[in-house]
Every structure is written in C-alpha cells, then in structure tokens.
Image: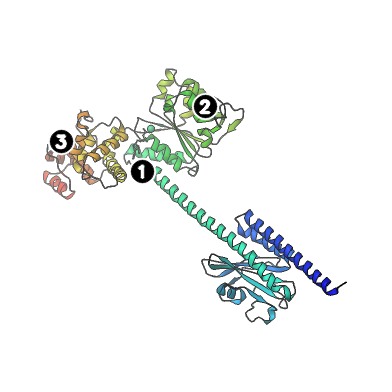
C-alpha cells in the first residue's frame, strides 16, 4: 500500500470526472444553442446547465446594446428576486471592465474587489467571481459571469471552461444577429414592395376626373370594404383589370394574394385544373399534386377575367364554388373550403347571353351582385389629356427617358373614337414615342402611327369635340381648348361659344400658352 500513490490516484479520478462533466456540459450547451436562433430563450437553458452541472451559481449574461453602447443583463440564473433591467456602461464595475479590456477576470474574494458594484444584488461577497468576455469576431459583444462554488485551486480551470462556453455563445449570438439583420432587410424590402404594388394598383394610377369615372371610383371605394362579388363590365381596354386590382389593394385583403385567371385563354379541361388544382396522377401529365387558383387565392382575391367566355358545363362547376365556397381538386376525394373574394370581368352583354341560353341565369345573378360599368373612352374624352400625360410618363419610364407631349398632339387624340379604349391609346402613344427620336410627341408623330387613317370624327353631327365646355371640372385652359376644338380653331367662333370677345380669347390663348393649330 502506498498512501501517496493512492492520493494521486484519487486526485486523478476527481480531475477526470470534472473534465468529463465539463465536456458533457459543453456538449449540452452546443446542443441547446443550435436548437433555436432565439438566443434570449436558449441562454436561460445554458445558464441552468452551468448551475446544475458545474457548480457555477448566479450565472449571468450581459450583451452589448448596440443603440446605447451599454451592456444589458439579458439573462440571470436563479435570481431569488426578479431582477430589474441592469446596465453597465463600458468600464463600469467588473462587467464594464471586462467589456473594455476583453480579458477574463478571476477574483478570489469579491469583497476585496474595489470595482465590485453588486448591482444585481445576488452575489455572496465572500465567494470568488469569474467573468469572461463573449467575443464576436474581434470585438467584445458581452460578458458571461458566475460565482463558482469550488475551491481556489479550481478557479483557473473554471475560468477556462467558462471561456469555452462564452465562445459558443458568441458564435450563436453572431449567427442569430446576422439572421435577424437579414430578416429585417427582407421585411423592409417586402414592405416597400407592398407599398409599391399598392401605389401601382391603388387609385393613383387610375386616371379620370369625368363624372362617370368619379362614379366608378366611388363604387370601388364602397365595394372594396366588403367581400361582395364584383362584376366589372365594359369594352376591352377600358381598364377592367385595373379596377379589379384597385378593389383588391384597397380592401382588407390587400395583404393577401391577388390571383388572376383569364377564362378565355384556356379550354375547359385546363381551366378546371387551373382553377381547382389536381391530385397526382389525376390525368396524364398530372405528375404531381398542384394547387388551383382558388386555393392560391385563399384569404385574398381571385380575378376571373373574361368570365363571359366559359362553357355551360364549366359555368355549373363555377356556380357551385361560388355558392358553397367548396370544391375538390381533380382526382381528389377531399372537399376543400376556401375564403376567396371574387372579382369577375366581361366585355359581353351577359343579359343577352342569358336570353340566348348561352349563359346560366343563376350564375349571372350570382356574379352580377355588384356591377361596375367602365365607360368607353369615347364617352369620357375629356380625360384624354390627363391620360395622355399619365401614359406618356409611364412609357417614358419604360424607355428610360422623359417624353414630352406637344399641345398639337392632343387635338387628333381627342377627336379619335378609340374603339380599343385606353389600351389603344397607350399603344398609339408608345408607337408615337418610338417614332420621335427626341422624345417629343407632336401631331406629326401621332399621324405617323396611322391614327389619322382610322379617323372617324366623334359626334360627327354636332362638331368635333364632345367636351362640354360648361363642365365645371374643366379648368380655364381646358375650356378654351375645348371651345377652339369645337369651333374648328376659328378664334372668333370659339370666343362666341365662351361668351368672350375675340380680343379676350386672343389674350387667353397667349397667357395660357395654347399653341393654335393652323387649319
Ligand atoms: N383609368 C385609367 N388610367 C390609367 N391607365 C389606364 C386606365 N384604364 C386603363 N388603363 C391602362 O390601359 C390598359 C388596358 O387596361 P385593362 O385594365 O387591361 O383593360 P381591360 O381589362 O378592360 O381590357 C392597361 O395598360 C391599363 O394600365
Ligand atoms: Mg382585360
């Protein structure tokens, strides 16, 4: 028997079991930290491990608050009383000192440490204290500290152990912060995209101040609030899709999806799978399950364009979803329920389609709950100057230059009938813009688009312009131009229309900077 050897063996065993314990703790800590990116939650558990397995009591973590530059105690283990928000300025107390120097501090007896502030009010001043920096890259991002319940001989190894834990914490905080920053960036990008989409689809891009357009805007405002089905009616190119957009983006569903489907573009069989989706293997080519537009639009709005074009068989299927809000995917037995607001559009006279037996009456009533009629452009030609300005800016943007529309272009544009409505006007301006190298659209550029050849004079019986010169919405300049148009640009005649003398109109033409067309 050799007592010295025995003692050594005993110490080795103790050392070994402490090392094992530390290794086990490091393993646990790394597991906890990798489980979640919410470090406020995981850090609590980390401190619990230190307390339960490693004789480290009142373990606490203070992290740098980037806004104030102070250290904030974020986590404290087993505080006997709930702790108030405690902060240390860099250099303040033991924690602030570690923050400044970036070095660990091992104190054998707290009472002998002059920097000790006991702001948390939990520590036993007769015991030792260890604080280590939490570093991210090359800067100190916080402090991990605890009061060890071990003999002095163990202090240095405890400090080493805490440094390892602090390194793990540093990595996890760094990762969480970078993800947080990324998420914030994504969120702000999403919000700004949302604002942009709203701007593009709100009212600001709906040009029109004539009485019939103001009525349309009022209707949109009214109807947007509710879930009512809306049927937008009007000739092609009058802005029906724009209206559907405006309804969605001004409704409580604005943050939900806005899904479109052009019913005229697809044959029945495809239309069905587009709208209702299909299960894997439902038909040849259905290689995987697919959600239909109805499901995609859940919580939002589904825009069914050209609804007048669907076959009677399909009308029956659609009616069921509209009535019951339920449907099945093709090849699927499960009935799905969705919360979708329907906006439909058509340029067809659905009433006569119903009479001819081509459109189901019940579906017609179901859709026509709240009709909005888009006036054709020829019935609101007073809006043309504004539309031209708006569209020229839009086209200019897409061409990366500024387009100017000369006064001389407006006459021909206002006299044309526009059977293709705003879309045709937009196309015409785009062509004119392409023709004009310096970005100035004048009557010559307009005539180059071939518009003149398609001319049919508006209201041919009564004159040239249908603008009502007594319309209170016209400003002075618009009124004078309208009168000149109607008078075939004979100033004396225009003056009579306006109840002015030729001198007065001449003066206004000059001050309002109206370019007089020679005829
Ligand atoms: N009131 C309006 N203000 C500005 N642009 C309009 C207006 N009405 C239509 N447009 C434009 O005209 C084009 C055709 O509109 P769209 O909504 O597709 O018509 P529809 O669906 O009735 O055929 C689009 O480029 C649209 O932006
Ligand atoms: Mg359309």
The residue positioned farthest toward the top in the image shown: 356
* Secondary structure beneath label 1: loop
Quarter of the figure with residue 502: top left
At horizontal 58% and vertical 74% (from top left) the residue drawn is: 96
Label 2 SS = loop
Q: Secondary structure at mark 3?
A: loop
Q: Residues within 10 Å of mark 2 (few under 14, many from 20)?
A: few
Between tags 1 and 2, which lies in front? Answer: 2
Q: CA distance from mark 3 to mark 2?
A: 64 Å
Earlier sequence position, callout 3 versus callout 2: 2
Residue closest to the eye, 411 or 114: 114
Q: Farthest residue toward the right?
A: 1
Disc 1: which residue: 205
Residue that carries the numbered disc 2 in the rendered image? 285
Look at mark 3 in the image and give the residue it sits on. 488
Name the front one of labels 3 and 1.
1
Could you say where residue 489 lies in the image, as x and y percent from the top left? Answer: 14, 38
Mark 1 vs ligand 1: CB below 8 Å: yes
Q: Which residue is at 51% across, 28% downward?
A: 273
Q: Position of residue 449 (x, y in %)?
A: 22, 34
- Residue 369 in percent (x, y) is at 47, 31
The image quadrant of residue 179 is bottom right
- Neighbor class of circle 1 (other Cα within 10 Å; few <14, some 14-19, many 20+) is some
Q: Quadrant where the N terminus lies?
A: bottom right
Q: In the figure, is residue 81 to the left or right of 295?
A: right
Q: Position of residue 424 (x, y in %)?
A: 29, 33
Asked if one can make out residue 118 in the rendered structure from this viewpoint, the answer is no
Considering the image in quadrants, where does the C terminus appear? top left
Q: In percent of the image, x 74 and y 68: which residue is there?
A: 55
Q: Earlier in the sequence, mark 1 or mark 2?
A: 1
């Amino acid at each position: 028997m050799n007592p010295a050897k025995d003692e050594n063996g005993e110490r080795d065993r103790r050392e070994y079991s402490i090392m094992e314990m530390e290794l086990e703790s490091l393993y646990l800590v790394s597991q906890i930290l990798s489980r979640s990116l919410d470090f406020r939650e995981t850090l609590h558990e980390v401190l619990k491990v230190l307390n339960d397995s490693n004789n480290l009591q009142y373990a606490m973590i203070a992290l740098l608050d980037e806004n104030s530059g102070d250290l904030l105690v974020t986590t404290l283990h087993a505080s006997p009383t709930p702790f108030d928000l405690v902060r240390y300025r860099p250099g303040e107390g033991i924690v602030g000192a570690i923050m400044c120097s970036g070095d660990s501090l091992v104190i054998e007896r707290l009472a002998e440490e002059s920097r000790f502030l006991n702001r948390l009010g939990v520590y036993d001043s007769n015991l030792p204290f260890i604080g280590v920096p939490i570093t991210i890259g090359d800067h100190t991002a916080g402090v991990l500290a605890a009061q060890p319940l071990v003999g002095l001989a163990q202090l240095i190894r405890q400090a080493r152990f805490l440094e390892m834990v602090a390194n793990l914490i540093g990595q996890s905080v760094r990762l969480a912060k970078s993800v947080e920053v990324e998420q914030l960036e994504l969120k702000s990008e999403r919000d700004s995209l949302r604002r942009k989409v709203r701007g593009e689809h709100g009212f600001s891009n709906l040009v029109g101040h004539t009485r019939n357009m103001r009525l349309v805007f009022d209707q949109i405002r009214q109807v947007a609030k509710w879930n009512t089905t809306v049927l937008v009616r009007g000739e092609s190119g009058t802005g029906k899709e724009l209206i559907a957009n405006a309804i969605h983006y001004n409704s409580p569903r604005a943050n939900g999806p806005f899904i479109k489907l052009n019913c005229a573009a697809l044959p029945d069989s495809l239309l069905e799978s587009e709208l209702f989706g299909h299960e894997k293997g439902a038909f040849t080519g259905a290689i995987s399950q697919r959600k239909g537009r109805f499901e995609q639009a859940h919580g939002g709005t589904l825009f069914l364009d050209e609804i007048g074009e669907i076959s009677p068989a399909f009308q029956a299927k659609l009616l069921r979803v509209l009535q019951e809000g339920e449907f099945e995917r093709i090849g699927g037995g499960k009935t799905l329920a969705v919360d979708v607001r329907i906006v439909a559009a058509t340029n067809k006279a659905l009433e006569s389609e119903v009479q001819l037996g081509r459109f189901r009456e019940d579906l017609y009533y179901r859709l026509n709950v709240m009709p909005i009629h888009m006036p054709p452009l020829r019935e609101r030609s007073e809006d043309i100057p504004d539309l031209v300005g708006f569209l020229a800016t839009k086209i200019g943007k897409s061409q990366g230059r500024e387009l100017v529309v000369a006064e001389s272009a407006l006459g021909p544009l206002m006299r044309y009938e526009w059977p293709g409505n705003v879309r045709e006007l937009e196309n015409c301006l785009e062509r004119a813009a392409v023709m004009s190298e310096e970005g100035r659209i004048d009557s010559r550029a307009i005539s180059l688009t071939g518009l003149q050849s398609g001319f049919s004079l508006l209201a041919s019986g009564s004159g040239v312009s249908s603008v009502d010169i007594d319309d209170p919405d016209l400003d002075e300049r618009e009124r004078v131009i309208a009168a000149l148009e109607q008078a075939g640009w004979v100033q004396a005649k225009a003056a009579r229309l306006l109840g002015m003398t030729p001198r007065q109109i001449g003066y206004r033409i000059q001050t309002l900077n109206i370019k007089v067309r020679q005829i």
